[in-house]
Amino acid sequence: MPPSLFLEQMLNGLQFGLMLFLLAAGLTLVFGIMDMINLAHGSLYMIGAYLTATLVGLTGVFWLAVVLAVLGTALIGMLLEVSILRQLYRRDHLSQVLATFALILILNEGVRLIWGSQPLLLSAPEGLSGPVEILPGLFYSAFRLTIIAVGLAVAVLLLLLVNHTRAGMWLRAGASNREMAQAMGVPIKPLFTLLFGVGAALCAVAGAFLGPILAVQVGMGESILILAFVVIVIGGIGSIKGALVGALLVGIVDTAGRAFLPLLLGQVASPEVASNLGPALASILIYLLMAVVLFFKPQGLFPART
Amino acid sequence: MKKVLWLLVFLGLVGFSLAQPRSVKVGFVSTLSGGGAALGIDARDGFNLAVRLLNNQLGGLPVEVLIADDQQNPDVARQAVDRMLKRDRVDFLTGIIFSNILLAVGEAIFEEKVFYISLNAGPSEYAGERCSPYFFNAAWQNDNLHEAMGQYVQTRRFENVFLLAPNYPAGRDALTGFKRFYRGRVVAEVYHRLNQLDFSAEIAQIRAARPRAVYAFEPGAMGVNFIKQYAEAGLMREIPLFLPGFSADADVIRAVGRALVGVYNSSQWALELNNPVNQRFVEEFRKAYGRTPTLYASQGYDTALMLDAAIRAVGGDLSKKDELRKAFLAGFNSTRGPLKFNPNGYPIQNYYLRQVIQAPNGEIVNRLVGTIFTNHSDAYVSQCKLR
Amino acid sequence: MLRKGWLLLLLGLLLAFPPVASATGLEFYMGLLTKIMIFALAASSLNLILGYGGMVSFGHAAYFGVGAYTVAILTREGLTSAWVIWPVALALCALLAFLIGAISLRTRGVYFIMITLAFAQMIYFVVVSFKQYGGEDGLRARRPEFGLFELNDTTLYYLTLGVLAACLYGLYRLVGSRFGRVLQAIRENESRTAALGYPVYYFQLLAFVLAGTLAGLAGVLMAHYTQYASPNLLAWQQSGHLMMMVILGGVGQFWGGVLGAVVLSLVEEVLQDLTIHWQLGVGVILLLVVLFAPKGLAGLWRRRKGL
């Protein structure tokens, strides 16, 4: 295998993993701290993408549209928390699952009512739509490089925020023991609303940057939500570091599986078998990864709760 | 006296039932939401346009069109078809875009002895041994457009080619069709997950394999994404991409834009086909919907014309199933000119070469370049026992 | 609990429905009822582990789908006798549930949810990778021969009714038995039950296998009903759908699964006819149920009767 191919696939995995991290970070904090299963998290990703696509159409400037969409989605997320989700914190997990599943249906249809059922078009900004030569002979999409840069920047920012600020300290305290944190005077209610807003904003960033690569359509949130859950379970619920490691693992394993498994299989089995089995095995790989991790570490790689 | 009275009442009832304006009910089950929605919506708009231009009649009978969305989900389609067959008792069914959806509902329709006129999906399953007298396809057999492109890439004498398709039966059929006419070397035949939207892994493989040409069958939203990402990776200039007509039609051009310029593709229909039916269709479609029609729209339009011709031929008597079948087989005047059918219900027609170009006025259009096959049938017709 | 008299009346009405339906041209609704009864069986099987056992399985569709696919694959391979197909399908689902349960029951809480999901996803991708069995297109499932009667829409209706009634009776006896009480004790307090000397793991595993087998039975009936095995039967959305039915109906309430299946299917059916934005209606109804009927519809029923 040529090294440039290997490098390119690793970049692809990194890019996918970082976007997964943006989704998983909000999910793992809400889950870890509020003990709340929020299936509607993926819907915020969808709303972020739709807002970006609309605002790009209105303003014509991609970056301005992203900023506005992120703020808008954060606002919608906080509204959801105050109006509905807040009432679910004291309920059992199953009620939360049913209620947030209902929210998925409502938000999906809401989006369909506003924007129609055809996918929206969202293109990468003009200057980034071509390839760049990152190493002699190795071309890579400029927009995907931008995604990697944005993803890394947000990840670093988030880790600093959680590990080195007062709000972050409260968050970590809340994740490891909620009652204790509350007793120590952590302002739980506004903190939860703010946290939800941050989670929604991260979703919107992912939606805005994946929109041009994937598609802005109703239902885009559900399939990626399952992957985000896989990520936080592998990483350990409530741990930002775990979410980052889990996301990069899933991103790289999934990309490598799709790219290299059929090749590897081709060397040991007939091409017919390889082309049949390859895609199936590649799809299974991340679930296998999760099952293996849980088998050896039933609390995930970095358990937040002690 | 009393008897006469009863007789009069009876005759009156018979007369009433005969005088009742008979009507025809058509069930239209299609993909109207999600990634494949653009296809279903175009086909529906084409079908509705034809019905409207025929004064809301088919073959002289007033028509009622029942529309349902299958959400590209076989189970949802199954329910919708059940409802239309058993509750609404439709006379004809049509509309399905994707082969896997059609395969999930086909047998149930044929068992009820209801004609299904396919306006898009043309699975090989219904072309060969399992062909049904109640199945017709107004578009093509799934392999056809790929066969045409295989033939074209062969005549251009590309030494080798890289093949890409989603890992589902229609994807495998597509590449089989391509290879049936392409005799050069296949560098790699890559199948990926259905409805995958990120092609970075496949594009890296293409770049590493350095083929002379790429042929990709990516229906619906997958096509838009693949082409966009192929262009973003800078491969469009290095390795020519060949596509079936689905991936280069007006809907994809609207989504992808300039990236498609130069791409050759195959189709059974083209915007500028020179016949009166097509000219009227294109003009009226633009007037009604304000956009350029796609091949899906032409197929929807043709399906309505096909029903119209057959119902007219049997004088509006829908109970004469054998005669209806004969009327369907005899063909009709389509946007592709006079269209005839094989006993397996699939059309015999020409396949054209088109190229996406930027017109002098800046508009990006898919231009008719030449003819690849004349009066071409499908590869399975000999296995069908129907006559 | 529903009174015996009401149950017999309901059973009588269901038994009398097919002749009435075919006389009045309402065969469509006979099919709808068949489907609802199949979902009632699947949801009740999930309720056994989710409601009574406290095991939130997010992979229940795996057994449902494997049951259906077994019918499709065996009939395709030329087997026609239901007396072979049914036992094979049930044995396969039981074995699958045993393997998945044996590993998954080592985890707890949300990790259990995710590991059952992971196994179901693996099964999904394995099944769709078999090109000769239809892949993503699914596979036609012929109706097998029972010998005693011919399987058509009407006999399938009665068969489903009979199977559902028998399974519900069995489940009713089971949850009231010592086994059922221990299962509920484990749900309430696992360590205390273990301290009392009960082999918690084996009780849970047995319930898991039983629930998987019953879901497989529902899948077999589903394949007879649609005459088609679709990959969607195996998908995680299907697991979610079954879970919604149980939560909507009432977790750990005996009639929860049945009630949830009936209400959700009917709501979907009615709203689908009214508007293409029917999912909005379903969403609003589900949300209202969570907010105002914390124990599901069955709980609402009990509260009104003051029980």
Image: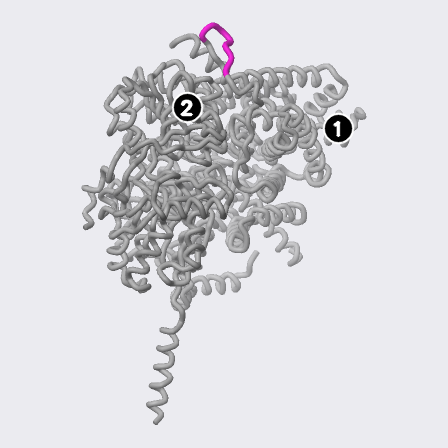
Q: Which residue is mark 2?
A: A282
State how far apart marks 2 and 1 are (Cα): 40 Å
How crowded is the residue under tag 2: few (<14 C-alpha within 10 Å), some, or many (20+)?
Answer: many
Count of labels in the image: 2
Q: Using the image, determine if residue C57 lies above or below residue B213.
A: below
Q: Is residue A123 above or below residue B310?
A: above
**Residue closer to the observer: B285 or B111:** B285
Q: Residues within 10 Å of mark 1 (few under 14, many from 20)?
A: some
Range shown magenta: A131-137
Asked whether, in this view, residue C165 is left or right of residue C187, the answer is left
Chain of the residue on which disc 2 is drawn: A
Residue shown at 36% from the left, 73% from the top: B18
Residue A191, label in figure: 1
Q: Residue C170: where, in percent of width, then height?
A: 45, 50
Q: Residue furthest bottom?
A: B1
In the image, what residue occupies the spot 33% across and 86% down?
A: B7
Element under disc 2: helix
On the rendered image, what quadrant is the N terminus of chain B found in?
bottom left
Q: Nearer the viewer, residue B156 or C169?
A: B156
Q: What residue is drawn where x is 64% and y is 58%?
A: C305
- Amino acid type at image mark 1: Leu
Residue C32 belongs to the span the image colors magenta: no
**Which circle's residue, 2 or 1, is located before the other in the chain?**
1
The circle on residue C149 is none
